[in-house]
Amino acid sequence: MESKPKRVAAECPDCGEKVTLRGTVTLGQRVTCPHCESVLEVVESDPVELDWAYDEDWDQDEEEDEDW
């Protein structure tokens, strides 16, 4: 008998809709919300929690802007 891939659902922090993840969920894993197309990142694994994914380059640009 073949086992089905594990499915886990978490709430999108942008639109509040359910995002289903299949297979092994890992911290830092990036997913796209199928409802609002936000790029999200797994920040907790048990229970699974999603947050907006940030690029490190973007964070550095923001910090430089704050110095002005």
Image (cartoon, rainbow, N blue to C red):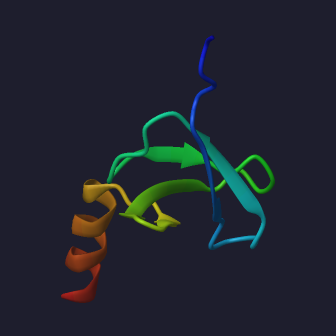
Residue 64: quarter of image: bottom left
Whether residue 40 is visible here, answered yes or no, is yes
Residue 7: quarter of image: top right
The quarter of the rendered structure image containing the N terminus is top right
**Residue 38 vs residue 50, the one in the foreground:** 50
**Residue 62 vs residue 32, the one in the foreground:** 32
Q: For the point 46% across and 46% down, which residue is it? A: 30
Residue 62, image x, y percentages: 31, 74
Residue 27, image x, y percentages: 32, 53
Q: For the point 47% across and 68% down, which residue is it? A: 47
Residue 28, image x, y percentages: 33, 52
Is residue 57 left or right of 29 when viewed as pictured?
A: left
Give the vertical position of 27 relative to 17 (above or below).
above
Give the vertical position of 20 relative to 4 (above or below).
below
Residue 24: quarter of image: top left
Residue 36, image x, y percentages: 77, 56
Give the vertical position of 30 relative to 52 (above or below).
above
Q: How many marks?
A: 0
Give the vertical position of 11 relative to 2 (above or below).
below
The quarter of the rendered structure image containing the C terminus is bottom left
**Residue 26 vs residue 37, the one in the foreground:** 26
